[in-house]
Image (cartoon, rainbow, N blue to C red):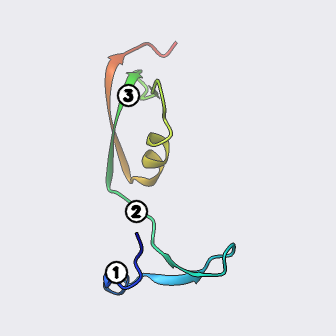
Amino acid sequence: MTLVGSDLATVNGWQTVTDPYSGKAVYAIPAIRPDVAVVHVNEIDELGNARIYGTPFWDHPLTRAARHVLITAEKLVTTD
């Protein structure tokens, strides 16, 4: 999929930059900054430390990008 020939770039004000690897013009799209990220975790303690079993690779950047993070958990555990 490409934006070439689409009005999306014009409507959103996206600019093109030169790809340093290929030398081609590509669109620079601003990062998404959500107001709230809701993350479901396996365990959480009273201090708000959360543990995710499995793959945390999507949750980590999501929690860093959002202005606020709401966590739901399966189980409340001790901090120890």
Q: Earlier in the sequence, mark 2 or mark 1?
A: 1
- Which mark is in front, 1 or 3? 1
Circle 3 SS class? strand
Q: Earlier in the sequence, mark 2 or mark 3?
A: 2
For residue 39, which quarter of the picture? top left
Which mark, by number, is residue 12? 1
**Residue at the spot x=42%, y=81% of the render?**
14
| Inter-mark Cα distance, 2 to 3 | 23 Å
Circle 1 SS class? helix
| Inter-mark Cα distance, 1 to 3 | 35 Å
Residue 45 at x, y = what percent?
A: 41, 21
* Amino acid type at mark 3: Val
Q: Count residues near mark 1 (Cα–Cα under 10 Å), then give few for <14, some for 14-19, many for 20+.
A: few
Which mark, by number, is residue 3? none
**Residue at the spot x=69%, y=72% of the render?**
21
**Residue at the spot x=42%, y=74% of the render?**
2
Circle 2 SS class? loop
Residue 74 at x, y = what percent?
A: 31, 20
For residue 35, which quarter of the picture? bottom left
* Amino acid type at mark 1: Asn
- Residue under circle 3? 41
- Residue under circle 2? 32
Image: 25 above or below 32: below
Image: 80 above or below 42: above
* Amino acid type at mark 2: Ile
For residue 32, which quarter of the picture? bottom left
Q: Which quadrant is home to the N terminus?
A: bottom left
Q: Count residues near mark 2 (Cα–Cα under 10 Å), then give few for <14, some for 14-19, many for 20+.
A: few
**Residue at the spot x=45%, y=54% of the render?**
65
Say whether residue 57 is left or right of residue 23: left
Residue 43 at x, y = what percent?
A: 40, 21
Residue 71 at x, y = what percent?
A: 34, 34
